[in-house]
Image: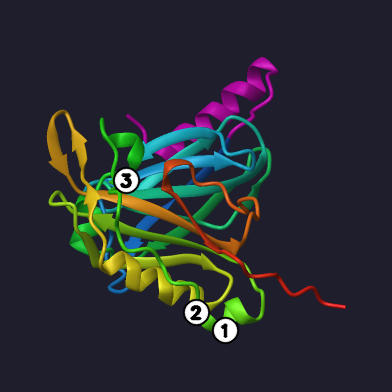
């Protein structure tokens, strides 16, 4: 079989001969380690458009890390890369024009083993759940006195025994470092119902959303069962003049 580049030329010639438009737009490249720059094989890649839909999927070559993704139409795309079960990263969006070939090297973080072996919530039959009566984050004194609310999004692996693996703990977003520190302390002391996959307890990447506010403030964040609401009761929010 001719190599891919030769097949692309042949397809273009055939399209020209029969009078059909050649509408191929391709992303090709190599997945490498961010630290060592060595190729990463068997990475699962998805071409995602700007509306979040997956346009194409492929697995990188097991030895070279090379891949090809064909887009169905021109547009803005990003490449989502999954290593193992939980090593997820995504490239910035780029423009892919009609009949264009974009060639790039995609460097991914060197995820710890605990991340690579952990499952996402959609990949388990019973997801991680927050146990009742666990330590709750303490409202930071300065933020409380200033009348400042805040939201923290944190992600970490919950191990099969129900303990958070603090070596994997990461802050995704926070409105102030003091909110993030309060959440970190509470998480380190908490326990969870572990995830299960086909009846077996497994590690899962867990996203926790903590909403700090005052009195009867409505939630400022969405998080479903992963949302923890902290309210400073009996405190009147200061309103800037």
Q: Nearer the viewer, mark 2 or mark 1?
A: 1
Direction from residue 33 to residue 11 in the image, left or right: right
Q: CA distance from mark 3 to mark 2?
A: 41 Å
Observer-nearest of 232 and 65: 232
Label drawn at residue 142: 1
Image coordinates for residue 76, horizontal then vertical, percent: 65, 45
Q: Are marks 1 and 3 in contact (CB under 8 Å)?
A: no
Please report whichever mark, 3 or 2, sits nearer to the chain's N-terminal start. Answer: 3
Query: Above or below — where is 23 with respect to 35?
Result: above
Q: Nearer the viewer, mark 3 or mark 2?
A: 2
Q: Are marks 2 and 1 in contact (CB under 8 Å)?
A: yes
SS class, disc 1: helix
* Residue at 27 percent of width and 73 percent of height: 36
Please report whichever mark, 1 or 3, sits nearer to the chain's N-terminal start. Answer: 3
Q: Quadrant of the N terminus?
A: top left
- The local crowd at label 3, few if under 14, some if 14 to 19, many if 20 or more residues have their Cα within 10 Å, is many
Mark 3 = which residue?
60
- The local crowd at label 2, few if under 14, some if 14 to 19, many if 20 or more residues have their Cα within 10 Å, is some
What residue span does the magenta drawing correspond to?
1-24
Label drawn at residue 187: none
The way the protein has been coloured in the rendering is rainbow
Observer-nearest of 70 and 122: 122
Image coordinates for residue 102, horizontal then vertical, percent: 56, 51
Mark 2 = which residue?
178
Q: Residue furthest bottom?
A: 142
Q: CA distance from mark 1 to mark 3?
A: 49 Å
Q: CA distance from mark 2 to mark 1?
A: 9 Å
Q: Nearer the viewer, mark 1 or mark 3?
A: 1
Image coordinates for residue 11, horizontal then vertical, percent: 53, 27
């Amino acid at each position: 079989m001719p190599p891919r580049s030769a097949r692309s030329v042949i397809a273009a010639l055939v399209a020209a001969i029969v009078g059909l438009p050649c509408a191929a737009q391709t992303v090709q490249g190599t997945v490498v380690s961010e630290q060592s720059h060595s190729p990463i094989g068997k990475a699962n890649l998805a071409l995602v458009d700007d509306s979040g839909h997956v346009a194409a999927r492929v697995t990188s070559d097991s030895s070279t890390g090379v891949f090809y993704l064909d887009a169905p139409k021109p547009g803005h795309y990003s490449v989502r890369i999954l290593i193992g079960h939980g090593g997820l990263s995504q490239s910035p969006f780029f423009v892919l024009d009609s009949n264009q070939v974009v060639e790039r090297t995609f460097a991914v973080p060197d995820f710890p083993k605990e991340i690579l072996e952990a499952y996402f919530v959609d990949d388990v039959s019973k997801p991680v759940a927050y146990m009742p009566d666990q330590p709750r984050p303490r409202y930071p004194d300065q933020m409380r006195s200033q009348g400042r609310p805040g939201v923290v999004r944190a992600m970490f692996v919950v191990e099969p025994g129900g303990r958070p693996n603090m070596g994997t703990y990461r802050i995704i977003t926070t409105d102030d470092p003091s909110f993030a520190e309060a959440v970190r302390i509470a998480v380190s002391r908490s326990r969870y119902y572990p995830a299960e996959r086909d009846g077996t307890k497994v590690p899962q990447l867990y996203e926790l959303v903590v909403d700090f506010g005052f009195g009867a403030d409505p939630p400022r964040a969405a998080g479903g069962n992963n949302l923890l609401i902290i309210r400073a009761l009996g405190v009147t929010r200061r309103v800037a003049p």
